[in-house]
Amino acid sequence: MGSQIISSNPDIDVRRVLDALRWIVRDLRVASASHGLPLGLSAAQMFVLHVLQGEPGLSLGELADRTVTDQSSVSVVVRKLHEKRLVVKRTAKDDRRRIEVSLTPAGMRVAEGAPRPVQEALISRLSEMDPAERRHLRQLLERIAPVGAVGPPMFFDDLPNTTGSEKAHE
């Protein structure tokens, strides 16, 4: 339980890795603040709206695949969007076990006015990487990332409450 002493002159690669992570986090924060938060939406919610704009009627599993996240995480985002009346959930006609999610007219207006989600650009850049490089990056990031008991959250969906408002980031 002792603390580690951090070198006063860290390795240049440590600095460069942290700088790259800072730029990624900054892009996500800026996207959330400028595109979603004025409407009371998180960056994750805006991303889901964008995906549904291009592909209405996706199941939660398909939506999780399109957003490259865990189904339980996207389910929480969809629930919040449904509560805000930006999406509708319907039982599929061909499979009563399947729930399809689509935008409401209000959700379509929000999605149409939003710029390209930063998550989409990040996914695109990662997809353009050589598969071996991408696998190596994954392995390295998994070594330093905190591990949760359930699937990882979507980018900037449930931020810790730092404003004192219980609904600050829902």
Image: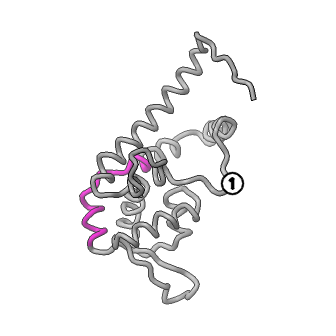
Q: Residue at x 49, y 89 (%)?
A: 93
Q: Residue at x 52, y 88 (%)?
A: 94
Indicate the secondary structure of the residue bearing disc 1.
loop
Question: Residue 96 placed where, x, y %?
Answer: 55, 88
Q: Nearer the viewer, residue 92 or 22?
A: 22
The answer to which image quadrant residue 39 occupies is: bottom left
Q: Residue at x 69, y 36 (%)?
A: 143
The residue beneath circle 1 is: 149
Q: Nearer the viewer, residue 84 or 152?
A: 84
Magenta range is 106-120
Q: Residues within 10 Å of mark 1 (few under 14, many from 20)?
A: few
Residue 110 highlighted magenta (yes or no): yes
Q: Relative to 90, does residue 54 appear above or below in the rendering? A: above
Q: Relative to 112, does residue 38 appear above or below in the rendering? A: above
Q: Amino acid at mark 1?
A: Ala
Residue farthest to the top, as pictured: 9
Q: Nearer the viewer, residue 4 or 75?
A: 4
Colouring scheme applied when the structure was drawn: one colour
Q: Quadrant of the N terminus?
A: top right
Left or right placement of residue 77 versus residue 30 in this view: right
Question: Residue 64 placed where, x, y %?
Answer: 53, 63
